[in-house]
Amino acid sequence: MAKRIDLSLPKEHGAWAMLFVPLAVGSLVARRFNAPVVLVILSATFVFIGRDSLLDWWRAINRKKTNAAALRALLIYFGLASVAALPLLVVYHLNLIAAFGLMAAILLGVNTAQATNREDRSILGEVLAICGLTLGAPAVYYAATSRLDTVAALLWTMCALFFTSSVFYVKFRVGSLNRRREDVRRRSWRNCAGYHAMLVVTLVGLWAAFGLKLFALVAFVPVLARSFWYLAKPEASLNLRRIGLLEIIYSVVFLVFVTLGLPPV
């Protein structure tokens, strides 16, 4: 426990899955695991770990205080991320990796600002965080193949769509327990139902437009089934640990079937 505190490692298990599943998907779909892929994974991991230190330092600045430990950890982790990313530009000439870095930096900055104002748990805040974490899928694919094509765009889209499902689902499960606020219960139900209905339509559209294999659609079946089941039969109790464990299992299913379903035929 002491080591985790010293290293300032993020404690949200779901966020780790949102980082590493897209990274794995990008490499598996590219069918390659080379040095550039390893460098992208290392760089993304260091940035992810450094996010908590960035938030601690940012909050201290906003309060007109100093946090030397957070600043030191921030510089170390972001420095390691830069060291890992530099060969991608200098040695392997993957110049577009800088665009991924810029997009990640912008999303990280927005997310940190929202977290400082306690707005990161809003739907918008969590979706933006997911967009940043799932950038790893096209970044790794690009590092492995030196290509940015339709497959890269599909990887990011499908990973973001998948993990966003959990945002609406969990908020619905929590909101449905609020017996004192009927408006909260109804809104969380509508948001969850609306998102997953949109998800079905989007997946059908992607399948029709890009000729996705059936496996790529099967990857979403567990999260669609669990959402529509609880929308039809809301429960009066909530076990967040069980939900978290199931979400990780669904992520593994997604990893396997998206890998089998991409690239498109």
Image (spheres, rainbow, N blue to C red):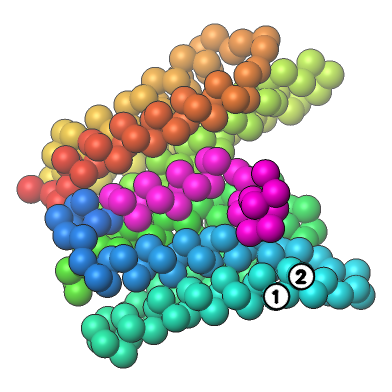
Residue type pointed to by label 1 = Arg
Q: Nearer the viewer, residue 26 or 114?
A: 26
Residue type pointed to by label 2 = Ala
Would you name the residue on which mark 2 appears? 69
Majority SS type along the magenta span: helix
Would you name the residue on which mark 1 appears? 72
Question: Which quarter of the picture shows residue 86?
Answer: bottom left
Question: Residue at point 81% right, 66% down?
Answer: 59
The N terminus is located in which quarter?
top right
**In the depicted structure, whether residue 95 falls above or below residue 178:** below
Question: Which quarter of the picture shows residue 72?
Answer: bottom right
**In the depicted structure, whether residue 123 falls above or below residue 250:** below
Question: Residue at point 72% right, 57% down?
Answer: 115
Residue 212 in percent (x, y) is at 16, 43
Gap in angstroms between the C-alphas marked 2 and 1: 5 Å
Q: Is residue 41 magenta?
A: no
Q: Is residue 20 magenta?
A: yes
Residue at the front extreme? 2
Give the magenta part as a residue range.
1-25
Q: Is 68 positioned to the left or the right of 148 in the image?
A: right
Bin the neighbour count of mark 2 within 10 Å (Cα to Cα): few under 14, some 14-19, many 20 and up.
few
Do the residues under discs 2 and 1 have CB atoms within 8 angstroms? yes
Q: Is 72 positioned to the left or the right of 145 in the image?
A: right
Residue 172 in percent (x, y) is at 61, 27
